[in-house]
Image (cartoon, rainbow, N blue to C red):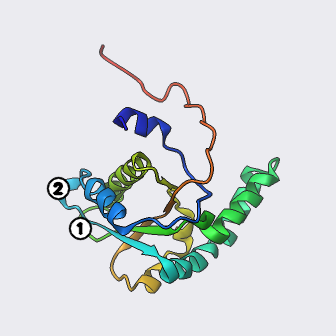
C-alpha cells in the first residue's frame, strides 16, 4: 500500500472481527512503528501489547472510564443521543478488538510535552502501518481517566499512559469525514 494512500484511508475502527492477530504480524508492525522521531532521540516510549485473558482484564478496567466521559459526551452531543450510546457500547468491550495496546512514556529529563510528542509520533506510525497491514485501530485517550488503575494492572511504575489502542481486523468501514479548511497558513511564498 502506498504511504499517501495508507494515511488518507486510515480510519478509527470501533468494531472488530473475532479473528486473532498473529504475534509475528504485530512484531512486524512495531518494527516499523518504532522508527518515529523523538526529542534528542530518547525513544522514551513503551508499548504493552495485550491479548487473551490479559486483554479482557484490561478491557474491564478501561470500560470504567466511560462514566468519567459521559457528562462531556452528553453535553457535546446533546442532540445526538445515539452517539453517546454507541460510545458507551464501544467502551464496554472496546469493539471486541482481539488486541489492545497501551502506550506510555518513560520520564526523560525533559518537559512532558516532548515526551507526549515522542509517543504520539510512534502511535501515528503504528496506526498507519497497522492499516497498511489490513488491521484497524482506534487511538483512545478516554481510558487515561483510569490511567493509574491501568498502570497498576500492568505493573508499570514511573511511566505516563498516553493512549489505549484497540486493534484487530475491522468489521466496519467508517465514512470519510471531511477535512477542515484553512488549517495550513503559508507565508513568504
Position of the C terminus, as image quadrant, is top left
Query: Is residue 80 among what the camera can see?
Result: yes
Tell me: residue 96, above or below residue 79: below
Answer whether labels 1 and 2 touch (C-beta < 8 Å): yes
Residue 64, position as x, y percentages in the image: 64, 76
> Nearest the camera: 127 or 63?
127
Depicted 70 relative to depicted 75: above or below: below
SS label for mark 2: helix
Q: Is residue 149 visible?
A: no
Question: Residue 1's x, y, as percent?
Answer: 37, 38
Residue at 30% in and 64% down: 27
- The residue to which callout 1 is attached is 108
Residue 28's x, y, as percent?
A: 30, 58
Q: Position of residue 78 (x, y in %)?
A: 80, 51
Residue at x 52%, y 61% (from the top left corner) = 141
In the picture as drawn, the residue positioned furthest to the top comes out as 189
Is 16 displayed left or right of 158 in the figure?
right
Q: Residues within 10 Å of mark 2 (few under 14, many from 20)?
A: few
| Label at residue 158 | none
Q: Which quadrant of the figure has residue 94? A: bottom right
Mark 1 and mark 2 lie on one chain; the one further toward the N terminus is 2
Q: Residue at x 37, y 49 (%)?
A: 129
Q: Which mark is residue 40?
A: 2
**Residue at 59% from the left image edge and 36% from the top image edge:** 176
Q: How many marks?
A: 2
Amino acid at each position: 500500500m502506498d504511504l499517501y494512500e495508507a494515511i488518507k484511508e486510515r480510519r478509527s475502527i470501533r468494531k472488530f472481527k473475532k479473528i486473532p492477530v498473529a504475534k509475528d504480524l504485530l512484531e512486524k508492525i512495531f518494527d516499523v512503528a518504532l522508527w518515529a522521531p523523538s526529542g534528542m532521540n530518547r525513544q522514551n516510549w513503551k508499548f504493552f501489547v495485550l491479548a487473551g485473558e490479559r486483554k479482557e482484564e484490561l478491557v474491564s478496567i478501561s470500560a470504567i472510564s466511560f462514566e468519567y466521559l459521559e457528562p462531556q459526551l452528553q453535553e457535546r452531543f446533546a442532540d445526538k443521543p445515539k452517539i453517546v450510546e454507541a460510545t458507551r457500547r464501544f467502551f464496554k468491550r472496546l469493539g471486541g478488538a482481539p488486541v489492545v495496546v497501551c502506550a506510555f512514556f518513560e520520564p526523560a529529563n525533559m518537559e512532558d510535552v516532548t515526551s507526549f510528542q515522542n509517543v504520539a509520533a510512534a502511535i501515528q506510525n503504528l496506526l498507519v502501518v497497522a492499516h497498511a497491514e489490513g488491521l484497524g485501530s482506534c487511538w483512545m485517550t478516554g481510558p487515561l481517566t483510569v490511567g493509574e488503575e491501568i498502570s497498576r494492572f500492568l505493573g508499570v511504575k514511573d511511566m505516563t499512559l498516553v493512549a489505549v489502542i484497540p486493534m484487530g481486523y475491522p468489521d466496519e468501514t467508517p465514512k470519510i469525514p471531511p477535512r477542515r479548511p484553512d488549517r495550513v497558513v503559508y507565508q513568504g511564498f
